[in-house]
Amino acid sequence: MKKSQLILIFSFIILFSSCIWQPPNNQVAKNGLPADTAKPSEKPESVSTKILTDTLPSDVDKINFVITYKPSHSSDYIAAYESGVPVTDKYATDRDVDKGQIYFPCSKKRLHDYKIPKQKIVNIVSIKYNMTVYDKTDYVFTQDTIFEIHTSTANAGIFTDSDIKLIPNVIDLSGKIKYTHQKSKNCNFDDNLFNHVLNFCSKNNIKIK
């Protein structure tokens, strides 16, 4: 083979190699992402995806409070209610007109259903007595309002009622916790429960607004 042909072949090989080689800073990983780009699973999560719980002594002897935080709130919050008999039935009216309904103690308003749109919800924290009787309070945090929704059963489970109170969400968990009290006692949150929940949120860095 002539010397000129060898030189031509060698030059072609060098040119081809330079086209497919890239500098280290632009290397492409096997996953198709630049080498200095983290995979989606490697990026730090800004919000905990774990269910968190805590147990605290309650005001009932030998019964504890259980606080639960579930990070997923992909659907509207619907206040629980149920009546095993019609609300106009004598069995219901003899015991209380709010049986099996949604009740707002502050305005004394009653509804047959109530929901908080998922788009408004920041987080939900629940607290309940650690016993078989259904008695639970949910704190639904939205950007501008906090809802205290106490749900319980009565009359051997025939009725399920939800009482709803709300206050402005002006709470800052970074310092000493302060919150608004209403003029009417009927409008105020349960201080004992609410303080437990706020301390739980502060301790676990749970976003509330």
Image (cartoon, grey):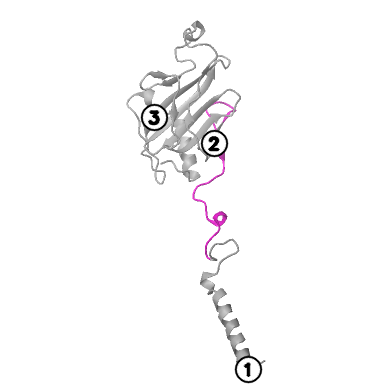
Q: Position of residue 62 (x, y in %)?
A: 60, 28
Disc 2, SS: strand
On the image, numbered disc 3 is attached to which residue? 166
The amino acid marked with disc number 3 is Leu
What's the residue at 49%, 7% (across, down)?
A: 89
Question: Residue 3 bears which disc, if any?
Answer: 1
Question: Is the Cβ of the residue at disc 1 closer than 8 Å to that at disc 3?
Answer: no
Compute the Cα span from label 2 to label 3. Answer: 20 Å
What's the residue at 60%, 92% (across, down)?
A: 4
| Magenta span of residues | 36-64
- The correct choice, above or below, for 204 with respect to 154 in the image is below
Q: Give residue 121's quadrant in the image.
A: top left
| Number of disc labels | 3
Q: Is residue 105 left or right of residue 52?
A: left
Crowd class of label 2 (few under 14; some 14 to 19; many from 20; radius 10 Å): some
Crowd class of label 3 (few under 14; some 14 to 19; many from 20; radius 10 Å): some
Q: Position of residue 78 (x, y in %)?
A: 48, 28
Q: Name the image quarter holding the N terminus.
A: bottom right
| Camera-side mark, 1 or 2 | 1
What's the residue at 56%, 57% (across, down)?
A: 42
